[in-house]
């Protein structure tokens, strides 16, 4: 089945090129993009590949539903071989065929066609769920990559600070306490980096499993960050969800199936008529009479079942109740979809505002404080504790920013899932000035 890639007309995550530091700013990032990851997962994921077989199963049932009943060949033989052996016998051969006279086969095919559509919708639902899982893992790996890069930047800054502090200690400008304080801060950052490496390896392994890639095979994601683009209105997102959600389409198909089942149940109130055509040959022996010649006869019979006691009342009532239930499910699902979209939409809005606050001034102010503290320390106007405190504050702020960015990306994925669209990208947009702080170097 061809995958339906549905991208919203109003908004998507625009993946942008991140600045990779002063030494490699503007360099083109390489790696697996989100679009490529989703395409790979839909093509190679082992569980999804097995789930897609449900369509072929439903199509096979449709084929079977359209086949008429087979005719029956009846053969019979009677003789008096064991009882006098006078030569009497009767032999018969007949063909019997059942004929549905109320369109039963056509109604069975209607039910089977709806089942094929339901199977297709089930696969689409599985693809949408898989795409959401891939996007979630993808963004976790992406954020962890940048968190590791942040630790590398802070480690390089602290290594310079340790070097400066040791030089000043040799000329008795600072105490050994200052050297130890700088070294402990450096070791703390190295420990954090080690833990982040472990987390990234775990997330990469889980992402590889979703993509159908053997664990251990190198897997690098495209190192680009999403820009903050305005979200469309809540009403627009809720309308798109009602148009795109596979589970709502499945509920609507449930109504169609209930109607098809009702028509089938009514058609089955009259059983198939049975027509039999046969040839019979026999010979009778009459004592005292001359030998009799063989007699032949052609017989035709028609069997008509009468719906007197069993009018399929239970099946009809069941189909009517199933239709009522399907209507109720549609109303409940529409309400739940609206509530789900509203909930994740509000969360995405809150997290987007939080990320924007970091980008619009808090990170730049923290960078300036670090530079002022370092300059003061180099000039002997500030203590090592002041520098470490400023750098710790900067580190905590960047970590909080990256955590907020990671939560925002997960909220965007959840919003895509709630709407029923695939998380994806559009052609690259220009770099937003506020995106740079995540990977820039502090001077």
Image: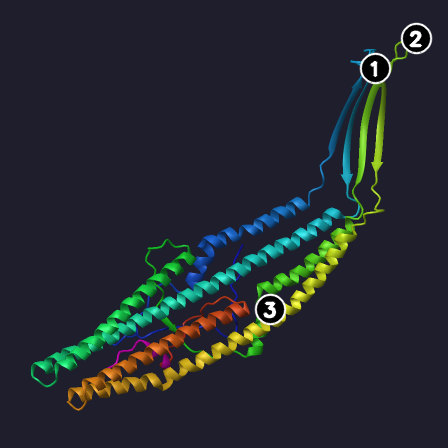
Q: Secondary structure at mark 3?
A: helix
Earlier in the chain: of badge 2 and badge 3, it is: 3
Residue 185, located in which quarter of the rendered image?
A: bottom left
Using the image, tell me which numbered label, if any, was put on residue 88: 1
Answer above or below: position of 324 versus 389: above
Q: CA distance from mark 1 to mark 2?
A: 15 Å
- Residue drawn 73% across the image and 49% down it: 106
Q: Secondary structure at mark 1?
A: loop
The residue most toward the left is 171
Image quadrant where one finds the C terminus: bottom left
Residue 191, located in which quarter of the rendered image?
A: bottom left
Residue 255 lies in the magenta-colored region: no
Which residue is tagged 2? 288
Contact flag, marks 2 and 3 (Cβ < 8 Å): no
Q: CA distance from mark 1 to mark 3?
A: 77 Å
* Magenta extent: 434-443
Q: Is residue 164 visible?
A: no
Mark 3 is surrounded, within 10 Å at the Cα level, by few (under 14), some (14 to 19) or many (20 or more) other residues, namely few
Query: What colouring method underlies this structural image?
Result: rainbow
Q: How many marks?
A: 3
Earlier in the chain: of badge 1 and badge 3, it is: 1
In the rendered image, residue 267, in percent from the top left (x then y), is placed at: 77, 50
Q: Is residue 326 left or right of residue 26?
A: right
Which residue is tagged 3? 243
Q: Is residue 146 left or right of residue 182?
A: right
Q: Is residue 137 left or right of residue 29?
A: right
Q: Is residue 100 left or right of residue 358?
A: right
Report the front residue among 329 and 240.
329
């Amino acid at each position: 089945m061809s995958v339906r890639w549905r991208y919203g007309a109003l908004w998507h995550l625009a993946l942008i090129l991140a600045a990779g530091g002063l030494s490699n700013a503007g360099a083109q990032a390489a790696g697996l993009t989100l679009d490529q990851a989703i395409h790979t997962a839909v093509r190679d994921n082992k569980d999804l590949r097995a789930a897609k077989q449900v369509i072929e199963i439903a199509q096979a049932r449709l084929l079977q539903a359209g086949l008429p009943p087979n005719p029956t060949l009846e053969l019979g033989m009677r003789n008096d071989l064991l009882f006098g052996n006078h030569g009497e016998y009767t032999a018969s051969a007949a063909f019997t065929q059942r004929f549905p006279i109320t369109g039963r086969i056509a109604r069975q095919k209607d039910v089977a066609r709806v089942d094929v559509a339901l199977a297709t919708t089930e696969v689409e639902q599985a693809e949408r769920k898989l795409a959401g899982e891939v996007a979630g893992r993808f963004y976790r790996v992406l954020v962890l990559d940048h968190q590791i890069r942040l630790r590398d930047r802070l480690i390089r800054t602290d290594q310079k600070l340790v070097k400066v502090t040791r030089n000043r200690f040799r000329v008795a400008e600072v105490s050994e306490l200052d050297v130890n304080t700088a070294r402990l801060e450096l070791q703390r950052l190295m420990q954090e980096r080690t833990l982040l490496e472990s987390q990234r390896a775990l997330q990469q392994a889980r992402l590889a499993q979703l993509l159908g890639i053997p664990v251990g095979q190198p897997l690098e994601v495209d190192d680009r960050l999403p820009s903050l683009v305005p979200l469309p209105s809540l009403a627009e997102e809720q309308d798109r969800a009602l148009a795109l959600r596979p589970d709502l389409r499945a509920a609507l198909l449930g109504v169609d199936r209930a109607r098809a089942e009702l028509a089938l149940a009514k058609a089955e109130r009259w059983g198939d008529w049975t027509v039999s055509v046969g040839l019979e040959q026999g010979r009778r022996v009459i004592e005292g009479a001359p030998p009799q010649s063989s007699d032949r006869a052609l017989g035709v019979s028609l069997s008509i079942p009468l719906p007197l006691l069993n009018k399929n009342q239970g099946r009809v009532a069941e189909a009517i109740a199933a239709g009522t239930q399907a209507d109720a499910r549609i109303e409940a699902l529409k309400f739940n979809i609206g509530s789900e979209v509203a909930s994740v939409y509000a969360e995405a809005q809150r997290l987007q505002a939080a990320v924007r606050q970091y980008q619009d001034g808090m990170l730049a102010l923290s960078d300036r404080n670090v530079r002022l503290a370092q300059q003061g320390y180099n000039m002997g106007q500030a203590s090592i504790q002041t520098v470490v405190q400023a750098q710790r504050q900067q580190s905590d702020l960047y970590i909080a920013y990256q955590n907020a960015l990671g939560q925002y990306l997960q909220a965007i994925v959840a919003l895509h899932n709630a709407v029923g669209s695939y998380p994806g990208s559009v052609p690259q947009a220009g770099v937003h000035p506020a995106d740079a702080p995540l990977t820039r170097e502090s001077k």
